Image (cartoon, rainbow, N blue to C red):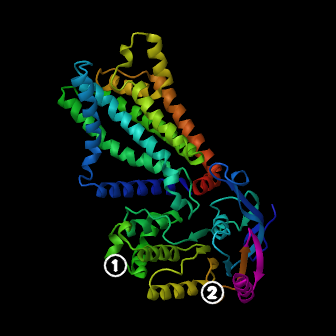
Amino acid sequence: MKSLDSQCVLELDAVSLNYRSGRASFDGGIHRVLNSVSFKLYEGETLGIIGRNGVGKTTLLRLMAGIIEPTCGVVRRKPGKTASLLTIALGFRPDLSGRDNALLSAMLQGCTKSEARLYLEDIKEFSELGDSFEEPVKTYSSGMRSRLGFTTALLTRVDILLIDEVLSVGDARFREKAQSAMKERVMGDQTVVYVSHSDVQVKSLCNRAIWIKDAKICAEGSPEEVVGDYNAHLKE
Amino acid sequence: MSPGRYIQLVDEMARMELRADASRYLLGYVWWILEPALYVTVFYVVFKIVLNSGRGDFLVFLICGKFAFIWFSKSVTQASNSIIANKGLIAKLDTPKSLFPMVIVQQSTYKQAAVFVLLFVMLVLFGYEVSWNWLWVIPLMVTNYLLILACSFIGACLVCLIRDFKMVISLAMIFLLFVSGIFWDVRALEDPAIANAILIFNPLAFLLDAYRQVLMYHSSPDIGHLFALMVGSALLVWVLVAVMRKANSLLALKALTS
């Protein structure tokens, strides 16, 4: 197997993903999500991925996180690097309290129980959930859920943070706080892949951007250029 | 994930789930005991009172079989759904998929501990003498647990790959309810060839009968048979965990897309 060059933490090499879903409805029931997508992710950079709904952005993140494998092509990850996906309100167990959910998330991301416990107070404080932290998540508003989800993922450390549209949630004040916390991580040595259809955030947070269209990479380069092309295309 | 961390996680998730489960109902933890007790009551009313069938010690006979059967059927049914039910987590993290059925089995095993206490209390109340022979239930429970785990893993994979298996599994549970000798005695069957076949091909029937041999009749179970079943189930669990590890991302894709 080809090894990665030293600065590269993750590489997608001609990755395609098809899957068969349910009964044959169209094209023999095969969905073609990605078609021969290749790019590299470098240590410490923040890569933005833009594209319209349903073009396979989330699927791309799942491939990078190692949750699913490509139908063909290879995903190479630098040995020992952990990647985690940060999404809005996904994976919560509604009957468990915010505390239990946070503990579980941290443990599933690789902490031992005692390590996870150490994070809990920070999570409680940052998320500003107060006493609701001990209440079942089913009683939370969607804003509260995303605050919990965001905080849990942010405070437990991973090497590659894969972010799926999280900054667009919560009230204005929390959004600002989340953005600045995010920026702090991004400016540091955190490697981040950031998926969004908000061009402003991609421009302000990312060093590099990729535009996905029709299952392929349509443009790659500086965020200004790529976002500019993307916006021009949307107006057509 | 290291085995130590995996076990810690299973234990933590199972206990959280039990706590959440208890808080959902007015009677909370009482249901751990109440549910199996009600099942037994229903069977008792139908078979003893309405149909007037069965033997003098029918209630104890029924309890010995039914309690262990509920442990099996509830675990396997719930575990079969468990990978799909955890779609949300699967979409977010690369987790070992065996974790989800494992948590369900662990959860029902903790509950079962309380049910077994009830079983022993009932036995004593009905005048059965406490004896060293009862220690045989330990290898029986271990075997029972391994069998549940193997069936849960199989069920969870099948339902994840093809949803239709959900229907088949609930039907299979009803079939097992009737052929495992819960409200009738395998040993009382007229044709010994059929009795033998049931004990050999239905491991659950063998286990339920063995519980009764140990608890009610102070005899030991068929040791060779029990040992073979225990080792066989353990091997199957081991193979299934390996297969699920190999197919980890396929299971994720199936859980997320079909």
Which secondary structure lies at badge 1? helix
The stretch in magenta equals A213-236
Q: Which residue is mark 2?
A: A205
Which comes sooner in the sequence, label 2 or label 1? 1
Task: Work out whether residue B99 can be spotted.
Answer: no
Give B141 or B206, whichever is nearer the viewer.
B206
Task: Work out whether residue B171 can be spotted.
Answer: yes
- Quadrant position of residue B108: top left
In the rendered view, would you say A91 is above or below A125? above
- Quadrant position of residue B74: top left
Instruction: Report the amino acid beneath label 2.
Output: Leu
Do the residues indicated by labels 2 and 1 lie within the same chain of the protein?
Answer: yes
Q: Measured from the top left, where is residue B22 in percent x and y? A: 30, 54
Q: Which residue is mark 1?
A: A130
At 75% from the left and 68% from the top, the residue drawn is A12
At 77% from the left and 80% from the top, the residue drawn is A220
At 29% from the left and 27% from the top, the residue drawn is B62
The extreme right residue here reads A2
- In the rendered structure, the answer to whether residue B188 lies left or right of residue B236 reads left
Which secondary structure lies at badge 2? helix
Q: Measured from the top left, where is residue B31 in percent x and y? A: 27, 47
Q: Measured from the top left, where is residue B67 in percent x and y? A: 33, 35
Instruction: Report the amino acid beneath label 1.
Output: Gly
Chain bearing mark 2: A
- Image quarter (top left, top right, bottom left or bottom right) of the N terminus of chain B: bottom right
Give A147 or A142, whichever is nearer the viewer.
A142
